[in-house]
Amino acid sequence: MRFFYTCKQAHQMLSEGLDRELNVAERAQLKLHLGMCRSCTNFKNQMTLMRQAMKKMSKDGGE
């Protein structure tokens, strides 16, 4: 296991984190990567925004 995630690995962990709780090591590595990588931080923010929008759409009945 590498200490630093690549951007590809960080994207995978961000996606997996939507479906399951990441373990301590995964969260730590992801946090470290996000602290250094603006691109992946932007990706995380976009994923969060999309998830919130989808929840709102399902709550409002898609209207």
Image: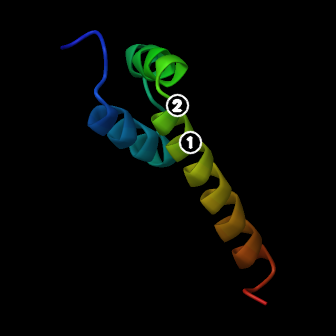
Extreme residue toward the bottom, this view: 63
Quadrant of the image for the N terminus? top left
Q: At numbered mark 2, what does the secondary structure look like: helix, strand or loop?
A: helix
Extreme residue toward the top, this view: 3
Residue nearer the viewer, 60 or 30: 30
The image shows residue 53 at horizontal and vertical percentages of 70, 66
Q: Residue at x 51, y 19 (%)?
A: 31
| Residue that badge 2 annotates | 38
The image shows residue 55 at horizontal and vertical percentages of 70, 66
- Horizontally, residue 19 falls left or right of residue 53, namely left
The three-letter amino acid code for the residue at tag 1 is Asn
Extreme residue toward the left, this view: 1
Using a 10 Å C-alpha cutoff, classify the residue at mark 1 as few (fewer than 14 neighbours), some (14 to 19) or many (20 or more).
Answer: few
Q: How many marks?
A: 2
Residue nearer the viewer, 34 or 53: 34
Q: Residue at x 62, y 59 (%)?
A: 51
Q: Residue at x 45, y 40 (%)?
A: 14
Q: At numbered mark 1, what does the secondary structure look like: helix, strand or loop?
A: helix
Quadrant of the image for the C terminus? bottom right
- Horizontally, residue 58 falls left or right of residue 20, namely right
The image shows residue 8 at horizontal and vertical percentages of 28, 38
Distance between the Cα atoms at labels 1 and 2? 6 Å
Residue 35, compared with residue 61, is above or below; it is: above
Q: Residue at x 44, y 23 (%)?
A: 30
The three-letter amino acid code for the residue at tag 2 is Arg
| Residue that badge 1 annotates | 42
